[in-house]
Amino acid sequence: MAGAIKLIGPDLVTETIPAEAIGGDVPFVGHLDGKPVVVVRTPDGVRAVGGRCTHYGGPLGDGLCDGERIHCPWHHAVYDVTTGEAVGAPALNPIPVYRATERDGQVTVEGPVEPSIPYRQPPANPESVVIVGSGAAGATAAETLRRLGYTNPITLIGEEAPVDRPNLSKDFLAGTAPEDWLPLRGLKFYADHDIELVTERQVESIDREQQEVVLDDGERFGYEALLLAPGAEPIRPPIDGADRPHVHYLRTLADSRAIVAAADAATDAAIVGAGFIGLEVAASLRQRGLAVTVIAPEEVPLAHIVGDALGRFVRDLHQEHGVELRLGRTVNEIRSDEVVLDDGSTVPAGMVVIGVGVKPRTGLAADAGLDIDKGIVVDDRLRTTDEHIWAAGDAARYPHPTAGPVRIEHWVLAQRQGQTAAANILGHDEAFTVPPFFWSQHYDIPINVTGHTGGWDEEIVRGDPAQHDVIVGYRSGNRIAAVASIYRDLDNLRAEVALAGDDQQALHGLLTEE
C-alpha cells in the first residue's frame, strides 16, 4: 500500500559492510539487486532480511532491532530475523532472508536464500478447532495455528470473509484505496491451508456438554478447542430519527460500502461522535468533497485518550481541512436532511454517520454460562472459565500486567491476542503481556499510540504537534503507562519494547527534556 522505497546505503552486490557499522537497535540499510535489505546484529551473529514490511510496505530500515526480531516503524509488525517469519501482527507474510557472513571485520550479504524453519510439533494437538468470528483475532488465530504446525481441522465462522478493517474508515472510505486491497487473504489461501471458512452464517449457541457450536440453520460443528472472537458492535444511541435510511454506522465492509454509496449522492454529512472512528470518517468524507460537520459533547476531541495537546492538534487539523466542529453539543433529532442539536440549532445532513463507540458481543458466551464482566472473562492465557474455550479480541476482558482487568478495542491487539490464543490452544502456555498499540490517520497524518492507561496525572509533551514532530507520555504517579507520537516512529517502538519489559527508566529517558 506504499510506493517504492527509495534505495539507500551501499549496493551489497559489490560492497561489503564494516562489521563495526552493524549493532545497536537501529538496522544497517543497503540494497541488493534493486531491493532494500537491512542488516542487524543479534546475540547469534549478523542477520540480513528484506527491508520492506509486508503489511503496508513500511521501511524496516527505519525500524528497531530487538534481539532476534525487527519491528516495523509504521504499525509495529514484528519479524524473526533468522526465518523472516511475521511473528507479531499486523503483518501476516514473511520477509525475504539473505545470507550474511562476517569475516575479517567485514560483512557480505548474498541471496535471498530459503530460510531454515524448524519442524514444529505442537505440545497439544486438539482433534479440531472451531473459531467463532472472522475479524482480527479469529482470522489471525487460524493462520497462526497452521504456522505453528497444527494439521487437524480448523473451522472459521464469521459474517464476512476477513478484511483489513482499519482501512474501512481510512483509505478505502476516502477513495484512495481500491476494494481489492481489503481482503486479508483470498479465498484460495484458506482452501490451500485447509481452513474451512464459513461466512454469512451466525452461531446461535454453544453446546458445552457436546462440545459443539450450533449455527442459525441448525448445522453443528464439533470442537475440542473453541476460540470465541465475536468482536464488538456499534452502540446505537436512542436518538429520534436514528433509524432513518440515510443514517449509517461503520463496522463491516458492507457498512463502508453503504457510506461510500451515500457519499456519492450527498453533498453534506453530519458525524455524530468525535472519537477516532468519527474523525477518520470525517477526514475521509472531506477528501471526497463533502461538507462535513462533527457533533460531540466534549470540548476537546480525543482528550480522554491522547490528552489535551494531541486532542487540540486533531481539532485544529480538522478545522484547517474545512470540517465544522460543533463541540459541547448533542443531537436531539435526525431529520431527512438535517440534524437538530440540543440548543435548537440545525446542521444540514444529506447523510449521517454515528460513531459513539462499540459494545462487546458477549451474548453467545453469556448464554453458554461463561463468566461475563464487561466482556468475556479470560485469564492471562486467554482461556475462559471452560478449559476448552478461549476468547480474544474486542470482546475479551483480560488481566493487563499493570492496569488489571481490561477490554481493549484495537485491531493490532486483537490480532496479537489471536496469535497468543492459538499458541495456547496448542499447549505453548504463553501469557499475553503484549503492550496495546493502535494507529489513527487524519489527512495522512498518523498518530501512533502504545500502551494503556485508564487515566494519568501528567501529560509529558516533547516536541510540537503542529510541526508533526512530537512524542507524548502519560504518567500516573511515577509510572509511564503509555506514549503517543507523530513521526517519532523509532521512539514509539522503543517505548513498546520498554513497556513490554516494564522498563520505566527507558521510558522516562525517551521523554527527557529536549
Image (spheres, rainbow, N blue to C red):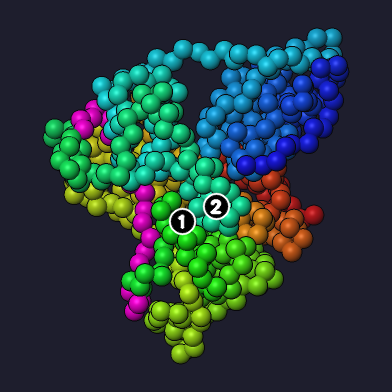
Figure check: 446 above or below 223: below
Residue extent of the magenta highlight: 221-241
Task: Report which residue position mark 1 lands on.
Answer: 256
Res 240 → quadrant: bottom left
Q: Which mark is residue 172?
A: 2
Name the amino acid type tagged 1.
Ser
Q: Which mark is residue 41?
A: none
Q: Is residue 250 covered in magenta?
A: no
Name the amino acid type tagged 2.
Phe
Q: Residues within 10 Å of mark 2 (few under 14, many from 20)?
A: many
Q: CA distance from mark 1 to mark 2?
A: 8 Å
Res 133 → quadrant: top left
Image quarter (top left, top right, bottom left or bottom right) of the C terminus: bottom right
Q: In the figure, is residue 412 to the left or right of 288?
A: left
Instruction: Say which residue appears at 55% left-offset and 79% top-offset.
Output: 326
Q: Position of residue 152 (x, y in %)?
A: 31, 20
CB-based contact (under 8 Å), mark 1 and mark 2: yes
Residue most extreme to the top? 104
Residue most extreme to the front? 265
Q: Is residue 225 covered in magenta?
A: yes
